[in-house]
Amino acid sequence: MPKRLNKKRADGRYAVQVYLGIVDGKRKYKTVYGATQKEANQKADDLKAKLHKGLDVEKENDCFSAWAERWLKIKNTEIGHSQQQVYKYSVERLNNYIGHMKLKDIKVFDIQIIITELSENNPNTGKPASKSLLKSIKQTAAQVFKLAIENRVVDYNPAEYVKIPKDAPANERRALTPEERSWIIETPHRMQTAAMIMMFAGLRRGELIPLTWSDVNLKAGTIQVNKAVEMIDGKPHVKTTKTKSGMRCVYISNILIDYLSKIKKESILVCPSHSGEMFTSDSFRRAWNSYLSDLDVKYGKIPQKKSKFDPRFGGITIDKITPHMLRHTFCTMMYENGVDVMTAKNQMGHADIQTTLNIYTHLSESHTEQKMKKMNVENIICKSIN
């Protein structure tokens, strides 16, 4: 690809033209500039190297925000509404820093500074950003660059080399303690059925809301998970499950079979709202908060609290139990009962076995720590006796 011109301009810069090829039947050139002849020649050589790699040099000056927008449009056809909001937020955060920058000019440091600053202070909350948010932002940047690489605009993905601070706060998803599990089993409430199914079958909230009695086979001891809802503007919209692996048959324990067999079936839905319809975001939240308030009256730290409506007591004193904590408890109980990781993956409906492995690994480390601490206590007791 010969240089067509090599000369000093009136403004003092040196210009070098590089032949790009035939476009619409005409020879096309691109001009690069340098303060010295050597600099201009180097830029020309760099441009020829990119052409040799098959990169689209006409688009190399595209800014990050343009490719992030293209990526979002593609991604939004593949994911649900809630995940769309997560990606949209990540793109907004990235655009605040590098949206105006050319893709070819973005370096690892430019993305690393985003992660570092957010890990110190998330301007939306005034607190350090969680590890999950930081990972989402890094992964979003990496996928935008991946799209650009696939389209031969750049050949380097700086987001891959960004580090997430080890001390970034993690959103720990703990399982219920044995005592808390007994609360779920022993406390009647219209949300008890939802809690029992999430704790003993591992259903997600979105899978629980559209669950019908035709999906439940008490004789076989199974629940067929074949649909879910996503909340759009707070309203439930039925769809297929989150992933193909989400479509599954969950084998349930006798305790859940016995519980469900005693329920009076007054609706097609297993867990309907007061109106007999599927829960909205607001109605589920209100019902769940009512359930937590009942648990607090019975098991909370204020013995004189006899009613959740008593104006003298504000808020709950027990640890807030969330639907996902119940699902995590189901996975924990499988681990405690020796269920192998592949079976656990299938029962949980995880798309990636690594998700299940991460939970099992964490549980194994936690149980090992508890056993070692117990052994240390027993050693101290034995020594004191001797």
Image (cartoon, rainbow, N blue to C red):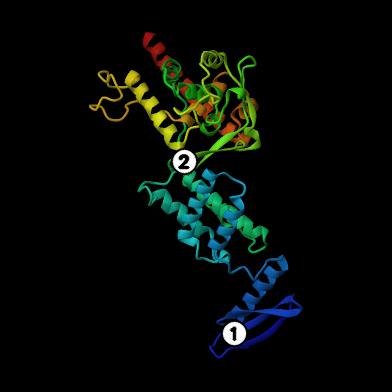
The disc at residue 39 is none
x and y percentages locating residue 284 in the rendered image: 44, 32
Q: Residue at x 39, y 13 (%)?
A: 381
Residue 7: give x, y in percent of width and height: 63, 88
Closer to the observer: label 1 or label 2? Answer: 2
Vertical relation: 198 (above or below) 71: above
Locate residue 130, reporting x and y percent: 44, 43
Q: In terms of secondary structure, where does tag 2 sit?
A: loop
| Residue on which the image places disc 1 | 14
The answer to whether 186 appears left or right of 204 in the picture is left
| Amino acid type, label 1 | Tyr
Classed neighbour count for the residue bearing mark 2: other residues with Cα under 10 Å, few (<14), some (14–19), many (≥20): few
For the point 45% across and 34% down, which residue is it? 172
Q: Residue furthest top?
A: 386
Task: Please state if 69 lies on the left or on the right of 96 as rendered.
Answer: right
- Residue lying farthest to the bottom in this orientation: 10
Q: Nearer the viewer, residue 127 or 48?
A: 127
Residue depicted at x 38% and y 50%: 124
Q: Position of residue 256 (x, y in %)?
A: 54, 17
Location of residue 338 (image quadrant): top right
Three-letter residue code for mark 2: Gly
Quadrant the N terminus occupies: bottom right
State whether residue 96 is above or below residue 362.
below
Find residue 234 and name its label.
2
Q: Residue furthest right?
A: 25
**Pointer 1 with pointer 2, Cβ within 8 A:** no
Location of the C terminus by quadrant is top left
279 or 122, which is in the foreground? 279
- How far apart, in angstroms, are the residues tagged by discs 1 and 2? 61 Å
